[in-house]
Amino acid sequence: METPKALKYTKTDEWIKVDGDEATVGISDYAQDQLSDIVYVELLVDEDDTVTKGDGIATIESVKAAADVNAPVSGTILAINEDLEDAPEKLNSDPYQSGWLIKMKLDDPSELDDLMSAEDYEAYNEEREA
């Protein structure tokens, strides 16, 4: 499973890629693997919405289960990936590129300090598998 080193991760399997005061958010390769074949994505936010760390930003449905996706940090939504409405399988095939969910402007970059590095996230996933 892929865990890009440049990203930060949450215990609820979201990833965040930070570029200055903006960030892209999606679900990890581990998450999409656990869900299996993703058949539906509902984005719960719109551009210009403000979210607080932990707020729901999407619901993902697969052939196995449904999962909520939460904002890993607080901020303002800059863009949503509308392509996922017609092609939810992008979350399975390319979770870190074309499968992104939202782009946001960070309110408080210090919230990133609470997230896991790729190494910590991999170790966390190994613990869950044990």
Image (cartoon, rainbow, N blue to C red):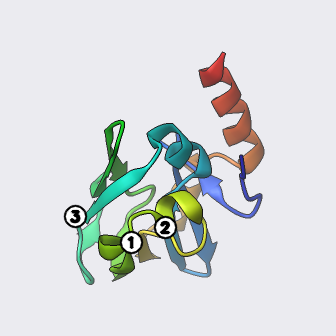
Front residue of 116 and 123: 123
Q: What residue type is labelled 1?
A: Ala
Specify whether residue 53 is in view.
Answer: no
Callout 1 crowding tier (Cα within 10 Å): few <14, some 14–19, many ≥20: some
Q: Determine whether the residue tagged by mark 1 lies in a helix, strand or loop.
A: loop
- Tell me the residue that label 1 is attached to: 87
Quarter occupied by residue 18: bottom right
Quarter occupied by residue 64: top left
- Report the mark closest to the observer, 2 or 3: 2
Point out residue 30 in the picture as x, y percentages from the top left corner: 59, 43
Point out residue 125 in the picture as x, y percentages from the top left corner: 64, 32
- Report the mark closest to the observer, 3 or 1: 1
- Tell me the residue that label 2 is attached to: 90
Mark 2–mark 1 contact, CB under 8 Å?
yes
Front residue of 55 and 66: 66
Callout 3 crowding tier (Cα within 10 Å): few <14, some 14–19, many ≥20: some
Mark 3–mark 1 contact, CB under 8 Å?
no
Point out residue 116 in the picture as x, y percentages from the top left corner: 64, 45
Q: How far apart are marks 3 and 1 (CA)?
A: 17 Å
Q: Distance between the residues labelled 2 and 3?
A: 18 Å
Q: Is residue 23 left or right of residue 87?
A: right
Callout 2 crowding tier (Cα within 10 Å): few <14, some 14–19, many ≥20: some
Q: Is residue 30 left or right of residue 34?
A: right
Q: Which residue is drawn at 50% across and 69% down?
A: 99
- Tell me the residue that label 3 is attached to: 44
Q: Determine whether the residue tagged by mark 3 lies in a helix, strand or loop.
A: loop
Q: Residue at x 62, y 79 (%)?
A: 19
Q: What residue type is labelled 3?
A: Leu
Point out residue 55 in the picture as x, y percentages from the top left corner: 28, 54
Q: Distance between the residues labelled 2 and 1?
A: 6 Å
Looking at the image, is 124 positioned above or below residue 47?
above
Sequence-wise first label, 2 or 3: 3
